[in-house]
Image (spheres, helix red, strand yellow):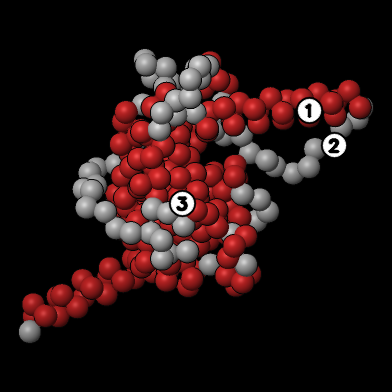
Amino acid sequence: MATSLRTSPFVVDKPVDNSSSTNDKEMMPKIDKSGRFCSPRAARELALLIIYASCLEGSDPIRLFEKRMNARREPGYEFDKASLLKYNHMSFGGPPVTTETVEEADELQLNDEKESAIEAEVLSAPPKLVYSKLLLRFTRKLLVAVVDKWDSHVLVIDKVSPPNWKNEPAGRILEFCILHMAMSEITVLGTRHQIVINEAVDLAKRFCDGAAPRIINGCLRTFLKDLSGASMAQTSEANEKVEV
């Protein structure tokens, strides 16, 4: 999966994220004055979908992102910006739901169909119509970070992920993409660890199934523990050299 991803000379600046908890994210404005998404969650969703698509296609995620950015709209295409207000970034699957009547089941199914239609419309729309310029820059920085660290993080993910995931990698591409993006945001963009972990877990709740959120949480915490240990070892080695 790593062979198709290449590095880029794009320079990564300071990340745009000052959220610290789920409550903070809920309080942040969802739409800016131009009527486009302005929450960092939306940028991470877009980056994740680009990385996932690039893995399936065997293409470069940055080039795929640029392709989507520059794609011409089909004649007569119109995007309903009202769908952005209806789109729910925090909609999670959850356990099976039991209904008492056929009417309740039909209503639940109808609501699910409406949410799916809104999601399809938003995620398939031209990015410039959906995301603010700030978020599009942040998305590109995430993609550049992922590409830059892909080969080294493949080895890390192989170390921290459970055996059953490694035995069926084709069925866990999305989960691995979340890990790649989270690890790269920590090591390259320098976003606070807890923010990244919370976001990764929420993305897993939204787009993955089963125990993925819990496993991704554990993988990232093991990654941070190893990262901290390696940093301390390097500091100790540097001090020893100075003393000598």
Q: Amino acid at mark 1?
A: Leu
Residue sticking out furthest to the front? 75
Distance CA(mark 1)–CA(mark 2): 10 Å
Point out the tag, 3 or 1, that comes first from the N-terminus: 3
- Looking at this view, is 23 or 183 the one in front? 183
Q: Nearer the viewer, mark 2 or mark 3?
A: 3
Label 3 secondary element:
helix
- Residue 190 left/right relative to 111: left
Badge 1 density bin: few <14, some 14–19, many ≥20, Cα 10 Å: some
The percent position of residue 29, horizontal first and vertical second, equals: 42, 22
Badge 2 density bin: few <14, some 14–19, many ≥20, Cα 10 Å: few
Residue drawn at point x = 41 percent, y = 61 percent: 4
Q: Is residue 178 visible?
A: no
| Residue ID for mark 1 | 108
The percent position of residue 3, horizontal first and vertical second, equals: 41, 66
| Residue ID for mark 2 | 98
Residue drawn at point x = 78 percent, y = 29 percent: 109
Distance CA(mark 2)–CA(mark 3): 37 Å
| Quadrant the C terminus occupies | bottom left
The percent position of residue 165, horizontal first and vertical second, equals: 60, 66
| Residue ID for mark 3 | 54
